Structures are given as C-alpha cells and as structure tokens.
Image: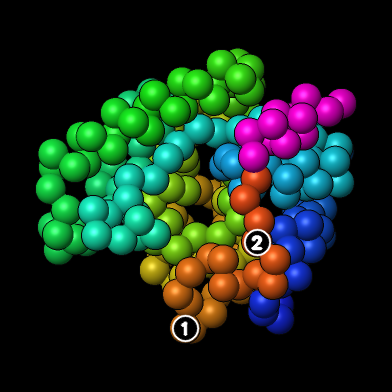
Amino acid sequence: MRDTVSLPLRDRDQAAHLLADRLDAWRGRNPLVLAIPRGAVPMGRIIADRLDAQLDVVLVRKIPSAIDPELAVGAVDEHGNRELAPWFPRARTSMDWVEQQTAGQLALMRQRRAAYGPAAPVAGRCVIVVDDGLATGSTMASALRALRAQRPERLVAAVPVASREALELIAPLCDETVCLAVPPDFTAVSRCYETFPQVEDAAAIALLRRP
C-alpha cells in the first residue's frame, strides 16, 4: 500500500500517526510492532499504542560504506546473519572493512539486547516492522529475512518514506508494505523530515518499558 503525503514530514511523531491510520485494520488483533532502533522506537510506541499492540525491537544494523557512512553496503542481524547489497562490488569497500564493521555492530547489538530485554515471540503473530525511512532498504531487508525464519502469520513493513529501489528490494520479503511517500528525488531519510533528532538509548528503553 502506497499513499502520497506532503514532504517534508514535521517529525517522527507525525509520521507514526499517519502510519497508524493506515494500519488501523490491525487494531485489536494482537499484532506485534517491532521497531528498528533507535530512531523508529518513538514511532513504534505511538503505533503500538494506537493499535493496542505489543512493542518490541528487531535488532539489525547497517554496514556502512568505507567512503560514505550514510550509504549502507549491507546489514547484519543480532544472530550474525549478514547480507551485502547488490551494489557492494561497486562500493569501493573491502571485505576486511565489512568484517570489522560486522564485529562492531554485533557487539553493539549484544549490548542493546541486554538493555532492551529478551525478544518477544514472533511465531504465529502478525508482525509489523517499523522504521523511520528506507534509503537502500538493506537494514529492513535483513530484519524481514530474520523474522520470516521465525514463522510469523503475517509480516508487514511500515515506513513513512522510502526510495523506489528500497521498496523493490523488500517487497518479496514481506506480505504487505505500507509506505506514505516515495519521492522521485530521494537522497536521504533525514531530508524528508523538518525535525529529525537522534534518539538516545535511555529514551528508547523508557519507551519500551512503558506499559
């Protein structure tokens, strides 16, 4: 499902409420909302509250290019499953760099899992994966693959904004995609928002623990 909204969005809160409107059919059906931390956790909290859903996180981290930290050349999940982007051979990034980045991201995810708590069960549930935007789509793709292996009843990807290429990448990996805007001149997720602050771990933990 793709709808058109005016960009830039005001902030993540506005984006979350707009997504919750599109996801309202899941309200009362005990869905599991999984936010990709840290940026999407405030959005996940709003969506989960609107849908009477459980909130948790799915831990996956992008592997940045050696020459551009904003460009993902792949992603790795908390179990060590790594996926490199189709354009990796052209990214001027060595496998030594990838191995180094993978090790660092795994260490970070271990710390976050310890802080966030054990993962919620996925099997047999409708799972809605939320992120604040998709540039390459590598991180969301890695999350969807990891979750599909856990046999959810239905797997939904929900994002306010994405590049066309990112949506094409993730479409085969989920049962439904909800995206509010696909700008033809997409450059970066942050440019699709008027306000796009960093989300600190303490804030994310507080939102996850809130009843």
Q: Which of the pair 46/124 is nearer the observer?
A: 46
Secondary structure, mark 2, is loop
Picture quadrant of residue 100 = top left
Compared across the picture, whether 50 is left or right of 10 comes to: right
Characterize the magenta stretch by its predominant secondary structure: helix
Residue depicted at x 39% and y 68%: 165
Residue positioned 78% across, 57% down in the render: 13
The residue range painted magenta reads 200-211
In the rendered view, tell whether residue 173 sits above or below residue 18. Answer: above
Task: Give the label, 2 or 1, closer to the camera.
Answer: 2
* Front in this rendered view, residue 31 or 20: 20
Q: Quadrant of the C terminus?
A: top right
Where does the image place residue 191, in percent across and percent down from the top left? 57, 73
Q: Which residue is mark 2?
A: 196
Q: Which residue is mark 1?
A: 185
Q: Is residue 137 left or right of residue 64?
A: right
Q: Residue 2 is drawn in which quadrant?
A: bottom right
Whole-percent x and y of residue 187?
Answer: 45, 75
Tell whether position 206 is magenta. yes
Q: Position of residue 52 (x, y in %)?
A: 86, 37
Q: Which amino acid, mark 2?
A: Phe
Q: Nearer the viewer, residue 92 or 87?
A: 92
3D distance between C-alphas at marks 2 and 1: 19 Å
Task: Please tell me which residue lies in front, 173 or 101.
Answer: 101
Instruction: Give the position of the N terminus as an image quadrant.
Output: bottom right
Label 2: few (<14), some (14–19) or many (≥20) C-alpha neighbours in 10 Å? some
State left or right for residue 195 relative to residue 123. Answer: right
SS assignment at label 1: loop
Going 38% across and 33% down the picture, which residue do you hit? Answer: 105
Residue 86 visible in this rendered orientation of the protein: no
Mark 2 and mark 1 lie on one chain; the one further toward the N terminus is 1
As for residue 98 lying within the magenta part, the answer is no
